[in-house]
Amino acid sequence: MAIQISEKAKQELAKLDVRGANFLRISTVAGGCQGMTYSASIDDEQLEGDRVLFEENELRVVTDEESVGYIDGLQIDYSDDLISAGFRFKNQRAARACGCGSSFSV
């Protein structure tokens, strides 16, 4: 299971206090024009069955058992452009993605 996080995204996650007991939880949910979308939240309670996808220094990324198959190959970046600043989730393994980049299909 491999995911990549850009240096800019790591810096932004540190600003959001994603370190120590806090971690980034990534999951997939049904929705969007292509069928699935990524959901991200800051959490501090790892549940039974959760899988650690990424761990470096104090940064940890976790997903649930149902989402793990859709996360492999995920790239997390951060854009600070004026119109749509925020985190970007891109997965080269997705079969298709919508034009706005918010949903994908496998």
Image (cartoon, rainbow, N blue to C red):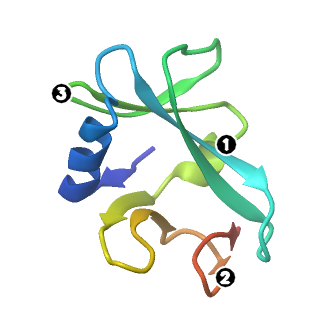
> Looking at the image, is 45 positioned above or below residue 77?
above
Badge 3 density bin: few <14, some 14–19, many ≥20, Cα 10 Å = few
Does 56 sit left or right of 73 as displayed? left
Q: Earlier in the sequence, mark 2 or mark 1?
A: 1
> Residue 55 sits in which quadrant?
top left
Q: Give SS at disc 2.
A: loop
Coordinates of residue 17 in the picture (x, y in percent)? 31, 29
Numbered mark located on residue 89 in the image: none
Residue placed under numbered mark 3 in the picture = 57
> Looking at the image, is 75 positioned above or below residue 13?
below
Coordinates of residue 72 in the picture (x, y in percent)? 51, 52
Q: CA distance from mark 1 to mark 3?
A: 24 Å
- Tell me the quarter of the image containing the C terminus: bottom right
- Amino acid identity at mark 1: Ser
Q: Earlier in the sequence, mark 3 or mark 2?
A: 3
Which residue does the image show at 48% across and 68% down from the upper left? 90
Counting every numbered tag in the picture gives 3
> Residue 40 sits in which quadrant?
top right
Coordinates of residue 94 in the picture (x, y in percent)? 60, 70
Which residue does the image show at 35% across and 78% down from the upper left? 82
- Amino acid identity at mark 3: Asn
> Looking at the image, is 76 positioned above or below residue 59?
below
Numbered mark located on residue 67 in the image: 1
Q: Give SS at disc 1.
A: loop
- Disc 1 or disc 3, which is closer to the eye? 3
- Amino acid identity at mark 2: Cys
Query: Answer yes or no: do the residues labelled 1 and 3 have beta carbons within 8 Å?
Result: no
Q: Earlier in the sequence, mark 1 or mark 3?
A: 3
Numbered mark located on residue 98 in the image: 2
Q: CA distance from mark 3 to mark 2?
A: 34 Å
Q: CA distance from mark 2 to mark 1?
A: 19 Å
> Looking at the image, is 82 positioned above or below residue 25?
below
